[in-house]
Amino acid sequence: MIPEQGDVDVLVTVKAAPQPSSTYGETVCVAGIYVPRMGEGRPELIRLYPVPYQYLQEDAGFKKYDLRTFRVRRNPRDSRAESRRVELNGEAPLVRTLRDWRRRADIVEEVPRSTMCELNAGTRADLDAASLGVVDVADAERLEIFETPPLSKEKVRLREAQAAQQELNLFNESARVVRKALELPPLSAKLHYRCAASACKGHAQGVIDWELTAMQFRELREGTDVPGLRERLTYKFFENPFADHKQPAVYVGNQENPRRRTVFSVLGMYYPSKTDLPLSERLF
């Protein structure tokens, strides 16, 4: 069981795109796997929120599949069982980085799987039901790529207020990265798939992985046009993860707002080759 507070080791698996918050400013949701120390239980999914935007940056922040030690405590504003408020204080010590899928799978495969149909039914019955999941993809149908819609008036207001606050603080070194976070990528994506539930009729969920945003800005800086960008996004987030030799799953999660708890998004993808799985997983 995830401790209510204290130091915990977390394998970072998800960094979601920044979202404006009237309480926390421009922040991101980071999720991963709580890796218990000896005798403390089994791995579980955990959400770390809020995390300042600059921790998304590869040079200043932490990378996916870093195993890091975070100091956490329960957040009284968030009733989701997996959520912990993180106290970074400028750092989260690195334990080690898992660079290949085989080592990652040794931990990820220990986390109990859910079907997306089960998660949906759970939050319809109880808004505080499981809010994170690792969902096996039985059939990846398509990745829908479309122009990013404009922000709502409320989100525009929040972002403008946050940007103005950063501009006022001339000594705030994070102003540049926060300003960058206000930019919207030209394209968004939605994954259409069926989970492993026998009666699954299919799911269509927005992909809010930070990599989807970061990749677009990087490609555009390098001169890739929008048609080319669509092709590269399709390969990165569909053709490669769901190739025949892969054993794909998606990390999914919902929102803190109780009115939106029944809406899940794809936070990231997990796609080891079948030969990278532990032997027991390959046999069964």
Image: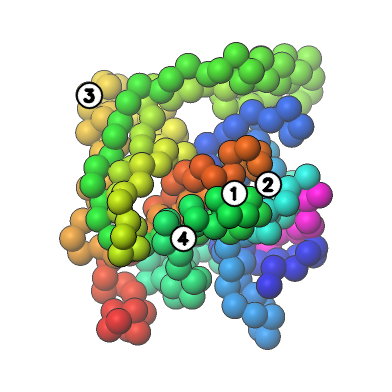
What secondary structure is the stretch in magenta mostly built from?
Answer: strand
Secondary structure, mark 2, is strand
Residue type, label 3: Pro
* CA–CA distance in space, label 2 to label 4: 24 Å
Q: In the rendered view, would you say 218 is above or below 267?
A: above
- Specify the segment rendered in magenta: 67-76
Q: Quadrant of residue 247?
A: bottom left
Residue in the picture at 79% in, 57% down: 73
Which residue corresponds to mark 4?
118
Q: Which kind of residue does numbered mark 2 sit on?
A: Tyr
x and y percentages locating residue 181 in the rendered image: 57, 27
Estimate the x, y position of residue 129 in percent, counting from the top left.
61, 58
Tell me whether circle 4 and circle 1 mark residues in contact (CB < 8 Å): no
Q: Dot 3 corresponds to which residue? A: 227
Q: Which mark is residue 168?
A: none
User: Which badge, 3 or 1, comes first in the chain's sequence?
Assistant: 1
- The residue where tag 2 is placed is 49
Residue 277 placement, left or right of 70: left
